[in-house]
Image (tube, rainbow, N blue to C red):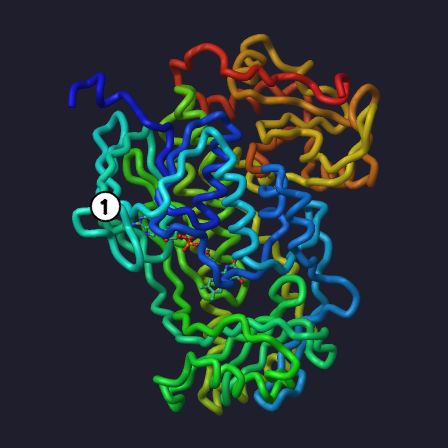
Amino acid sequence: MSDNENNRHDSDVLIAGAGPVGQVLALLLSQHGLRVSVVERWAQPYPLPRAVAMSHDVQRVLRQLGLGEELAEMIEPWGLDGHRFVVQDASGRTLAESGVTLDSESGLANMSGFSQPELEQLLERRVQADPRIEQHRGFTLESLSDDGSGVTATIRAHTGLAPVPGGELRTLRAAYAVGCDGANSTVRSLLGLEMTDLGFDRDWLVVDVVPHTPPTWLPFACQRLGPARPTTLVPAGPGRRRWEFMIMPTDDQDDVDTPENAWRLLEPWGIHRDNAELVRQARYTFRGRWVTEWRRGRVVLAGDAAHQMPPFMGQGFNSGIRDAANLAWRLALLVEGMGRESLLDDYAAERGTQVAQIVEQTVLIGQMFCMTDPEECARRDAGLKSLAHLNVQEESQNWLLRGGTLQDDGIGGSLGLQATVGTKTRTALLDEIITPPCFVLLGRDSDPLDRLSPAMQADWQRLGGRSAYFGLGGLTDTEGKYAPWFERLNASIVVIRPDFQVFGGVLDPSTTDGLVQGLAERVLTDNCPGMPTSDRSETLATKD
Ligand SMILES: Cc1cc2nc3c(=O)[nH]c(=O)nc-3n(C[C@H](O)[C@H](O)[C@H](O)COP(=O)(O)OP(=O)(O)OC[C@H]3O[C@@H](n4cnc5c(N)ncnc54)[C@H](O)[C@@H]3O)c2cc1C
């Protein structure tokens, strides 16, 4: 191919895999104005339940895509009255319990139950209706090469379980490629990327049920511990329940994932054919591993392609959507020719450290939940009993560790608060006022834009940033949550990134220039070509 042909791209970003992570990333990139190709081997979204727990920050990402109304109808907030998480010993006696936290720093339920197939159908409708996204469903990615100025992929027609021998072959070229192709990622294997594996490898039977009437005798969420048969019970979206039964060596391995076995295991919980419908039962191996290299050249990994973890903390899907949110604005800046190449290394560093920490925590919990040695179990149960009251959901999953595209000031890396604010014309959650997602300078009591020198104003405009502040002529802190938040951060001005993470902040407003300069140095390339396509730099609430 000549240089000219090399630089002709069918799309800005090629995404392999149309699971939830690929679809959300495609929609986010389109929101930034990018053209996207999505390659997916199956003709339809995967129809069976998988993830059931959606974190508040992930809900925020989906709401920013304009999915809020439909999402509200398909999720069930956790943490209402009577919602408790119970840990039981093998005989069903409560060892410890915890309330379920309702509040979060996103102004939304900390966790909500949902059905992954319903969400995937919603994402699919949006993707199909989006003129900037071209889907190649029924095609499998076969090869991928990166020549430094773009990536070239070949994809082959795929039906049933395999590519069609001699079937239609298409060649696609894009500026960047993202492997969102799940746990057995083709992109990961084509690149020969290694994984750090914690060696956790347990088979469980995952059973999804729709009870005919609410099963009021069951705990809201429960972990029944071994030695007999470790079992997890969780709500799985409106009207649904999920059981996860550890598969024991004494089980008849040929019979374990049959409907008959599922009903047999459900019987002691008071669930049977007369009072519930069995949606599915599937044997599933819980693993703890993540890719050591998230990025090679113009190819990046996200979602299950980059990490897998046991579902005990409900963080697999959530981590994948966080990957997509963290990556989308970086790719947008790179495609626009304004971003530094190091943005993708920062992606790898930020997501890599957070994911490794979550997988390690989940595996530790998994090791405790999967114990079957009677003596070890007795010691563990005694320890848990002495705790009696757990606080299972207090710890935020949203902190990004040091490094990456963050200011190292003890503020950078936290999740930006979302609460209700008032403008001249309406009252709404902050993300609904600042939409679409962009860099935001948020001031405690004065307009941060007034503090910027002309040079930094220009950089702020290149970044497509907006500003907002509380006080006269600005936003109203309707719920009174922002004042204490600024107090806690010991800041009067903060920069929030398009993925809602705080870049950093300053206490003295006269140092705002340095804050924006720090951001520009980490994000913008030295030879930035003029202004962004959309000049969004403005102050909110003076206009709204
Ligand atoms: C039983 C179970 C329970 C779970 N529970 C939870 C939970 O409670 N909470 C949670 O957060 N997570 C949970 N998870 C994890 C969650 O479902 C996954 O993290 C999530 O589906 C990952 O999304 P993804 O888009 O990265 O990958 P996937 O959903 O796996 O999508 C990858 C896509 O890539 C396609 N693909 C693969 N190779 C190719 C190729 N060569 N060419 C073209 N297309 C290709 C596949 O067909 C697939 O559609 C659970 C998972 C399972 C299995």
Q: Quadrant of the N terminus?
A: top left
Horizontal side, residue 151 vs residue 124: left or right: left
Residue 240 lies in what quarter of the image? Answer: bottom right
In this rendering, position of residue 256 left or right of residue 228: left
Front residue of 220 and 90: 220
Front in this rendered view, residue 420 or 460: 420
Report the label total.
1
Query: Compared with residue 26, is residue 187 higher up or lower down, i.e. above or below?
Result: below
The residue at 37%/45% (across/down) is: 137
- Residue 382 is at least partly visible in this image: no
Q: In the current view of this chain or complex, which residue is farthest to the top? A: 454
**In the displayed structure, does residue 145 sit left or right of residue 98?**
left
Residue 241, image x, y percentages: 61, 71
Name the residue rendered at 77%, 38% in the picture.
Answer: 420
Tell me where residue 217 sits by quadrant: bottom right
Q: Secondary structure at mark 1?
A: strand
* Label 1, ligand 1: CB separation under 8 Å: yes
In the rendered structure, which amino acid carries the disc numbered 1?
Answer: Glu
Vertical position of residue 263 compared to residue 30: above or below: below
Q: Label 1: how many residues lie within 10 Å, few (<14), some (14-19) or many (20+)?
A: some
Q: x, y (%) of residue 148? A: 24, 28
Please state the horizontal and vertical placement of residue 544, each as a whole percent of the image: 76, 21
The residue depicted at 60 percent of the width and 91 percent of the height is 91
Q: Residue at x 23, y 46 (%)?
A: 142
Quadrant where ligand 1 appears: bottom left
Q: In the rendering, at what x and y percent does residue 86 appear?
A: 66, 76
Residue 385: image quadrant is: bottom right
In the picture, measured across the screen, residue 296 lies left or right of residue 81, that is left
Does residue 268 show up?
yes
**Residue under label 1:** 142
Q: Is residue 230 above or below residue 69?
A: below
